[in-house]
Amino acid sequence: MTTRIGILISGRGSNMLALAGAMREGRLPGVEIALVVSDHADAAGLQRAREIGLKTAVVERAGRTREAHDRAIVAELQTHQVEIVCLAGYMRLLSKYFIDTYRNRILNIHPSLLPAFPGLDAHRQVIEHGVKWTGCTVHFVDESLDGGPIIGQRVVPVLDDDTEETLAARILEQEHELYAEALALVVSGRYEIHGRRVIRKS
Ligand code: GRF
């Protein structure tokens, strides 16, 4: 039995490629990428996805309401029998319809140690705030902004001479490993959600 995942991107797609790489290397046994969806036809990640043989779909907003757009995306995902959705640099908030349809089966990756620094420009927020440690978080998506139950985190130092770019690169390396690990846990089903807590079952 394979678990079919859908990956939503808006841009470069390095986390999507990292998940594909983890599958190739056997770090995500029983997981298959059924579809990569982008809300932008010119997302660099789309071309990369096609190059490695993944199925892709472009579902642009095209002036529709958030829910109408999401209904079109969900229809694509369902056509491809997607069971778990991974947001990987997908730059739009999801509607309640989308979240309800895939409740507790949507994952997101965010480049900070949530609940610190949610939202846009996390790296800039981190540097401006002056924290010494940051990292990345994979969490379930609920109606809150970057606020759903946390599946996994990785920590990285903030160095005195960091720019947004150097910090982002250090975090991104960890994102690529963390996302595969967190997805493996979710696919294994060896966890329970207690309130906000994701607890591993042995
Ligand atoms: C990553 O930093 C991710 O944490 C954030 O958006 C960025 C996407 O990068 N949500 P990529 O498109 O996966 O390369």
Image (cartoon, rainbow, N blue to C red):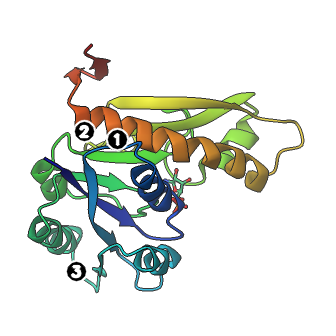
Taking the view exactly as shown, the residue that stands out farthest to the top is 202
In the image, 121 versus 193, the foreground residue is: 193
- Number of residue marks: 3
- Who's the residue at 27% across and 84% down the image? 63
For disc 2, the marked residue is 187
Q: Which mark is residue 64?
A: 3
- Who's the residue at 16% across and 75% down the image? 72
Residue 78: image location, x then y, percent: 10, 65
Residue 46: image location, x then y, percent: 43, 77
Q: Amino acid at mark 2?
A: Val
Tag 2: Cα neighbours inside 10 Å, few (<14), some, or many (≥20)? many
Q: Is residue 60 above or below residue 95?
A: below
Q: Amino acid at mark 1?
A: Leu
Looking at the rendered image, the disc whose residue lies closer to the viewer, 2 or 3, is: 2
Residue 107: image location, x then y, percent: 32, 45
Tag 1: Cα neighbours inside 10 Å, few (<14), some, or many (≥20)? many
Element marked by disc 2: helix
Element marked by disc 1: helix
Disc nearer the start of the sequence (2/3): 3
Mark 2 vs 3: CB contact within 8 A: no
Distance between mark 1 and mark 3 Cα atoms? 31 Å
Let me know if residue 109 appears in the view.
yes
- Who's the residue at 49% across and 56% down the image? 15
For disc 1, the marked residue is 183
Mark 1 vs 2: CB contact within 8 A: yes
